[in-house]
Amino acid sequence: ERSQAYIPDSVHIPMNSIPMRLNELDRERDIVVYCAHGNRSYSVAAYLLRNGIEAGSLAGGITDWWIRGGETESNFRR
């Protein structure tokens, strides 16, 4: 997914790496987790909350973000 579209200046941490990389999250900043459509990111945000890290999920994912005019970048190459 990240190669197709991402929010500029976002930090990419694959879902399965979250437990090992919790120390990389800046607890002083707003943390918004996103994926393509918002389903997996909802689960990750819930995991972060259970581990004492304030986080939310981007409703509709990056797909809805893009449709609504949110800024994205891409590494997609044809």
Image: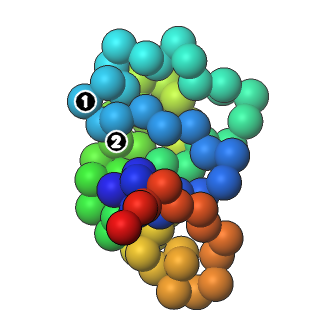
Task: Tell which circle, 1 or 2, labels the residue nearer the N-terminal end.
Answer: 1
Residue 47 is situated, as x and y percent measured from the top left of the image, at 33, 35
Question: In the rendered view, would you say 9 is above or below 77?
Answer: above
Q: Is residue 40 above or below residue 49?
A: below
Q: Residues within 10 Å of mark 1 (few under 14, many from 20)?
A: few
Residue under circle 2? Answer: 44
Q: CA distance from mark 1 to mark 2?
A: 9 Å
Identify the residue shown where x is 32% and y is 24%.
Answer: 17
Q: Nearer the viewer, mark 1 or mark 2?
A: 1
In the picture, measured across the screen, residue 20 lies left or right of residue 67, that is: left
Residue at mark 1? 16
**Kind of residue at disc 1:** Asn
User: In the rendered view of the protein, which quadrant contains the C terminus?
Assistant: bottom left
Q: Nearer the viewer, residue 23 or 77?
A: 77
**Viewer can see residue 14:** yes
At x 64%, y 75%, the residue is 70
Which is more toward the observer, 44 or 67?
A: 67
Percent position (x, y) of residue 50? 37, 30
* Location of residue 49 with respect to 45 vertically, above or below: above
Identified by mark 2, the residue type is Val
**41 left or right, relative to 64:** left
- Do tag 1 and tag 2 residues touch (Cβ < 8 Å)? no
Percent position (x, y) of residue 48?
42, 32
Q: Secondary structure at mark 1?
A: helix
In the image, what residue occupies the spot 43% across and 33% down? 13
Q: Position of residue 24 (x, y in %)?
A: 56, 18
Q: Residue at x 42, y 61 (%)?
A: 76
Q: Going by the image, does 59 lie left or right of 8?
A: left
- Residue 59 is marked as none
Q: Quadrant of residue 34?
A: bottom left
**In-front residue for pair 63/2:** 2
Q: Which residue ends up furthest to the right in the rendered image?
A: 28
